[in-house]
Image (cartoon, grey):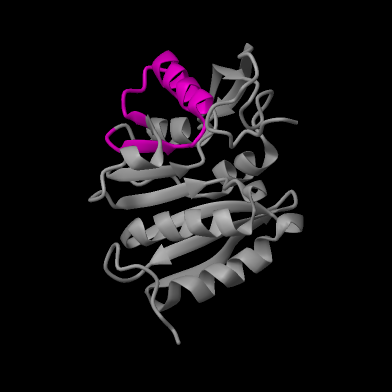
Amino acid sequence: MGQHYFSAAPSSPEHLRTIRVTLDGRDVELTTANGVFSPDRLDKGTEVLLSNAPEAPPGGDFLDMGCGWGAISLTLAMQAPHARIWALDVNERALDLVRRNAERLGLDNVFPVTADEIPSDVTFRTIRSNPPIRIGKPALHELLETWIPRLDRTSDGYFVVQKNLGSDSLQRWMDATFGDDFSTRRHATAKGFRVLKVRHHGDPRTGPVDVA
């Protein structure tokens, strides 16, 4: 392919396109482009996540980890206009699309960012993610170990993973890695995907517990 949707700066020429999707019960037209994840449609995994995760909390800081062109971030922003949505991605083209789409929908509470642009003292009332499984286990695990410990106390994260791409093994890894301060369980199953729910029971940003 020469590039991936998780490339920081896609090398191919940008070809913008308009798609029509339904987010939070609202039919909207959004801008996508090549060089990002699922540019032609709302992908099935994200659709499963949005259909099965509960409505967003009324306020706080939310994280969309691996935001792509913004389906999850935009949905959260519509559900919780008083929240601050951190739309996180390494792909500069994806972040630009999120900016365009938030502006198009009149949403001023979406902040497209790279990891170093999220202040270190921010903790999250919720995390919602269709994580980039295809970056490989080491990079995926590093991503999860960076952001899951920043869930606020008594807060939940929801992650959608395709069953045949290792959702059950990832659930076991998450349960073992984050220890007693966190619990991981299967929240929903639909269309070949699992939605995993992670709850933080302890103090925010304490990190994984050493269970050795």
Task: From the viewer's perspective, tell me whether residue 61 is left or right of residue 187.
Answer: left
Task: From the viewer's perspective, tell me whether residue 207 is left or right of residue 27.
Answer: left
Does residue 92 belong to the magenta stretch?
yes
Image coordinates of residue 25 in percent, x first then y, are: 53, 29
Does residue 133 belong to the magenta stretch?
no
Q: Is residue 158 above or below residue 172?
A: above
Image coordinates of residue 17 in percent, x first then y, are: 63, 12
Q: In which quadrant of the rendered image does the C terminus lie? A: bottom left
Q: Is residue 152 above or below residue 104?
A: below
Q: In which quadrant of the rendered image does the N terminus lie? A: top right
The residue drawn where x is 41% and y is 54% is: 147
Farthest residue in the left direction?
121
Farthest residue in the bottom direction?
212
The residue drawn where x is 61% and y is 28% is: 36
The residue drawn where x is 38% and y is 33% is: 113
Magenta residues, as a range? Answer: 82-111
Q: Identify the image quadrant of residue 60.
A: top left
Image coordinates of residue 173 in percent, x first then y, are: 57, 70
Q: Identify the image quadrant of residue 201.
A: bottom left
Q: How many marks?
A: 0
Image coordinates of residue 53 in percent, x first then y, are: 52, 49
Task: From the viewer's perspective, tell me whether residue 79 is left or right of residue 7.
Answer: left
The one nearer the camera, 36 or 64, is 36
The residue drawn where x is 46% and y is 21% is: 96
